[in-house]
Amino acid sequence: MPVPFEALLPYAIMIGMFGISGTGLAVVKNWQNEGKRPRYSVDQWDRQSTIDPAEQKLERTNKLNSDGP
């Protein structure tokens, strides 16, 4: 006995929205991190380490090396 396609439309919509929202979140996370992969488990050394002024010129932003809040 076949299943009418109208019964499967809500499931297709839900699966499609999960895919769209997951892709959107991945794009936003990638955009916020300037195209680099996200860093997990950043330890205290990475938070306080300084960058050489020559390397700082190559960086586009100073998001890890700012004094501000």
Image (spheres, rainbow, N blue to C red):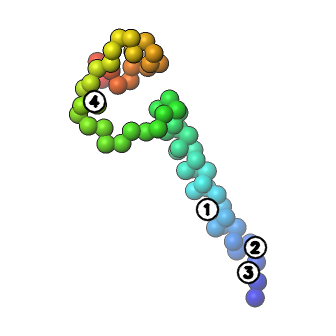
- Residue 17 is situated, as x and y percent measured from the top left of the image, at 61, 55
Q: Compare residues 24 and 7 and report the one nearer the observer.
A: 24
Say whether residue 1 is left or right of residue 23.
right
Give the CA separation, mark 1 to mark 2: 15 Å
Instruction: Answer with mark 1 or mark 2, whichever residue precedes in sequence.
Output: 2
The residues bearing labels 2 and 3 have C-alpha atoms spaced at a distance of 6 Å
Q: Which residue is at 56% across, 40% downward?
A: 27
Going by the numbered disc 2, the residue's amino acid type is: Phe
Whichever of callouts 1 and 4 sits on the residue coming sooner in the sequence is 1
Q: CA distance from mark 1 to mark 3?
A: 18 Å
Q: Which mark is residue 47?
A: 4
Pick whichever of labels 4 and 3 is earlier in the sequence.
Answer: 3
Q: According to the image, label 1 marks what residue?
A: 14
Q: How many marks?
A: 4
Q: Taking 66 as reference, is 4 left or right?
A: right
Which amino acid does the dot numbered 4 rest on? Arg
Separation of disc 1 and disc 4 at Cα? 40 Å
Query: Answer yes or no: do the residues labelled 2 and 3 have beta carbons within 8 Å?
Result: yes
> In this figure, which residue is indicated by the disc labeled 2?
5
Is 52 situated above or below 46?
A: above
Choose mark 1 or mark 4, whichever is in front. 4
Classed neighbour count for the residue bearing mark 3: other residues with Cα under 10 Å, few (<14), some (14–19), many (≥20): few
Residue corresponding to mark 3: 3
Q: Quadrant of residue 44?
A: top left
Label 4, residues with CA under 10 Å away: few <14, some 14-19, many ≥20? few
Label 2 crowd bin: few (<14), some (14–19), many (20+), radius 10 Å: few
